[in-house]
Image (cartoon, rainbow, N blue to C red):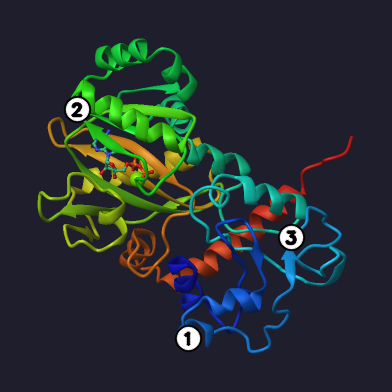
Amino acid sequence: MRSARAVIEAIDREKYEVVPIGITKKGHWLSPAEAAGLLPESARQLLPKEISNAGETVAIIGDPSRPGLVALNHNGNSRQSQALDVVFPVLHGTYGEDGTIQGLLEMAGIPYVGCGVLASSCGMDKVLMKALFRDAGLPICKYTWFLRSEWERERNIVLRRISREIGFPCFVKPANLGSSVGISKAKSRRTLEEAIELAARYDRKVIVEEGLDVREIECAVIGNDEPEASLPGEYVVLDKQAAFLDYAEKYSGTGHVEFVVPAALKRRMTERVQRMAKQAFQAVDGAGLARVDFFLRRDTNELLVNELNTIPGLTDVSGYPKMWTASGLPFSQVLDRLIQLAFERYADKSRIQTSI
Ligand SMILES: Nc1ncnc2c1ncn2[C@@H]1O[C@H](COP(=O)(O)OP(=O)(O)O)[C@@H](O)[C@H]1O
Ligand SMILES: [Mg+2]
């Protein structure tokens, strides 16, 4: 919601007419009027005046002859539809960032902002993502992974493998998620078991990484086949209460961490971050945008790719817009460019022969 609001506030209204669409936690789609009602007054003011069809059931259907938002009546019959030129999925996490809504938009034949199905799903799965990074020659931390079913069947084998291959401290994470949900740092075998139990509540796949003492550097990427990288930023820990960037540190403004752009790095390190950010983007076959997060080891000064986020936070306090602003590209221009890239990618894909 906060990201959507920031996009609505920054988008060029001379050029674009925003049709807000909301999806509830249960998966129900809200009409533009209902969705607009969720926005604060200041953002609602910026939307076109004639938003109607309140209370109707709306959907995007996987039929390219009806591209856009289809309004359905109570019998499920479709009424009129509202054409959509391009969709901007400002949706974080499951169903928004993992390739599923991207698949729906592909089937519907509507251009959309950001990564396609493959890059989105690979960017969501930390195990798959790491395999692609490694294959592209990018440095990553030591890790292992297992399925929840494996854990439930043979706990001791899994625990021994982690102790042997990874050691302590280690970070235990659900493979598919984000925002630090379900992630914990384990310092002993006992806390490791608790950490695995927690992670296994959120996914059927769990990843365990070596716990490193790091600086956290991020870089914004924009583009399709020839991506560009912004100036890097850094999450600077102001007080040691922030053990790591958990959910509260990221979103509640605890005041323990601060996002600084540009990150205080030597020129060569800045260039390395930018080069690796673009390589990571290409390793997952990214499109449109991504934020690439790095670990800079304090002990060895080694730069590792941690992860890539295909729909990074876009709020006024988020890293992605901040890094572009500091790089000379204001957020409204970023949005303009992202929409242009969505059309370019759509046109490029439309050249592909699909019947033989
Ligand atoms: N291997 C690691 N070593 C040190 N800190 C880590 C490690 N993995 C994660 N962290 C900490 O946990 C945070 C969240 O982990 P991350 O892999 O980025 O998950 P998410 O997708 O939820 O953002 C990181 O920003 C960092 O503070
Ligand atoms: Mg992260």
Q: Is the residue at mark 2 in contact range of ligand 1, meaning its CB lies under 8 Å from it? A: no
**309 w.r.t. 253: above or below:** above
Rendering quarter of residue 37: bottom right
Q: Residues within 10 Å of mark 2 (few under 14, many from 20)?
A: some
If the picture is divided into quarters, which one holds ligand 1?
top left
Three-letter residue code for mark 3: Ile
Disc 2 designates what residue?
169
Q: Is the residue at mark 3 in contact range of ligand 1, meaning its CB lies under 8 Å from it? A: no
| Residue 150 in picture, x, y percent from top left | 46, 17
Q: Indicate the secondary structure of the residue bearing disc 2.
A: loop
Disc 3 designates what residue?
60
Q: How far apart are the alpha carbons under marks 2 and 3?
A: 46 Å
Instruction: Give residue 41's mark.
Output: 1
| Residue at 52% in and 75% down | 38
Instruction: Judge from the rendering whether residue 329 lies leftward or rightward of residue 99; answer left or right.
Output: left
Tag 3 or tag 1, which sits nearer the N-term? 1
Q: How far apart are the alpha carbons under marks 1 and 3?
A: 27 Å
In front here: 155 or 277? 155
Three-letter residue code for mark 2: Pro
Is residue 140 shown to the viewer in this render? no
Three-letter residue code for mark 1: Glu
| Residue 306 in picture, x, y percent from top left | 34, 38
